[in-house]
Every structure is written in structure tokens, then in C-alpha cells.
Amino acid sequence: MTRIVAISGSLRKGSYNTALLHAAKEMMPAGAELQILAIDAVPLFNEDVEKQGVPAVVDALKAQLAAADGLLVSTPEYNNSIPGVLKNAIDWMSRPGADIPRIFHGKPFALMGATPSGFGTLNAQTAWLPLIRYFRFRPCFANPLYVSAAHEKFDSDLKLTDATVSAALKKLLADFVVFTQNQV
């Protein structure tokens, strides 16, 4: 069984990115599962807190990511970049620095994002490139998914209703699962 963990970069209850992950969970190919990790309890990074020990919620996230076959991130775009809460969670998971190879190096990684704007999180996904390089993720860029006008693609219950986005999401997931199974 291929196990992918996923993180939404939005804490909002009505988040299109979280909704996109829930749609992905239901569309996973046979033999694969998606577990959505919550980052809402991750405190703001503070080295004074770190000196007292990495918070238990962060240790749990790190363990889940280390054990997973891949990481899927669904990111909104805030001010043309990565949301602070998402970057904060990644910063915490990189602590202590000696854990970076165990948690991140070689980890298959895929990005997608949804936004009400017209660019579909292109800038936020591009802003991930330095992090992908730094953490030595193994990125899967085969099928980028930039969901623009997200408010038109989900119903009032945040169910994905757009056939084109659904097909693109299924393709991204199928290719990502295969990608996670291929060793380099």
C-alpha cells in the first residue's frame, strides 16, 4: 500500500485547498491511501521553545512524514507566495537540523493549489522551488495543478464539482503514486 501524507496550507474552515485534499483522498488510485495532516496546532517557530524540546505535535508530524511514501501539499497563495502557517510547519519539521535527511531527503513531493484568483497559485508553487532544493525533496512535476476561480469549482459543501479539475486531480494522483514507487 502506497501511503501519501498531505498538508493544506490553509487553516480556514472553508478552505478550497483543504477541500481539494479531501477530493484527492476520495480519488486515490487502488493500492494507495492519502492521510491529511493538520498543522493548526503547530506553534509559531521560536528557538526558545525549541531549546525546551520540539513540541509533541511537531514530532508527530515528522514521524508521519518520515513513514510516508510521499508528501502532497495543497497551497493557497498569500501575497504571491507560500502561506506563513505552511512555511512555519515546514520550519518546525526541519528541527533539529540533523533530522532533515531522515524527514525530507529523497521524499517524493507534489504540489497543487486552489485560489479564487485567476492564476491558480502559480506564484506560491514557484515559491516552493528553493525549499524543494534545500530539503532535497524528489519533486514530481509531471502534472501541475493550478485551480483558479476555485469558488466556481466547489459547491457550498466544498465538494469538487468541476469535471476538468477532477480529471486533472485524478491524473496528478495516479502519476504521483507511480512516481513514489519508482526509486532513483
Image: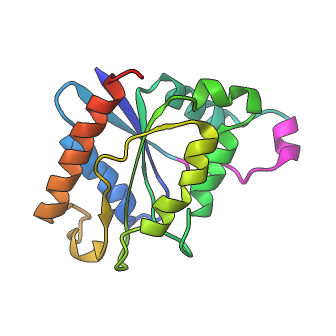
Q: Quadrant of the C terminus?
A: top left
In this view, the residue in front, 12 or 25, is: 25
Q: Quadrant of residue 15?
A: bottom left
Q: Seen in the image, is 64 located left or right of residue 72?
A: right
In this view, the residue in front, 47 or 82, is: 82
Q: Position of residue 95 (x, y in %)?
A: 73, 36
Q: Seen in the image, is 155 located left or right of residue 87?
A: left
Q: Quadrant of the N terminus?
A: top left
Residue depicted at x 52% and y 37%: 137
Q: Main secondary structure of the magenta part?
A: loop
In this view, the residue in front, 160 or 142, is: 142
**Residue 33 seen in render:** no
| Image vertical order of residue 69 relative to residue 110, above or below | above
| Image vertical order of residue 19 relative to residue 32, above or below | below
Q: Is residue 60 magenta?
A: no
Q: Position of residue 3 (x, y in %)?
A: 35, 27
Q: Seen in the image, is 54 located left or right of residue 47?
A: left
Report the span colored magenta.
39-51
Q: Residue furthest front?
A: 184
Q: Is residue 50 magenta?
A: yes
Residue depicted at x 57% and y 29%: 105
Q: Quadrant of residue 174?
A: top left
Residue depicted at x 53% and y 73%: 80
Q: Position of residue 70 (x, y in %)?
A: 42, 32
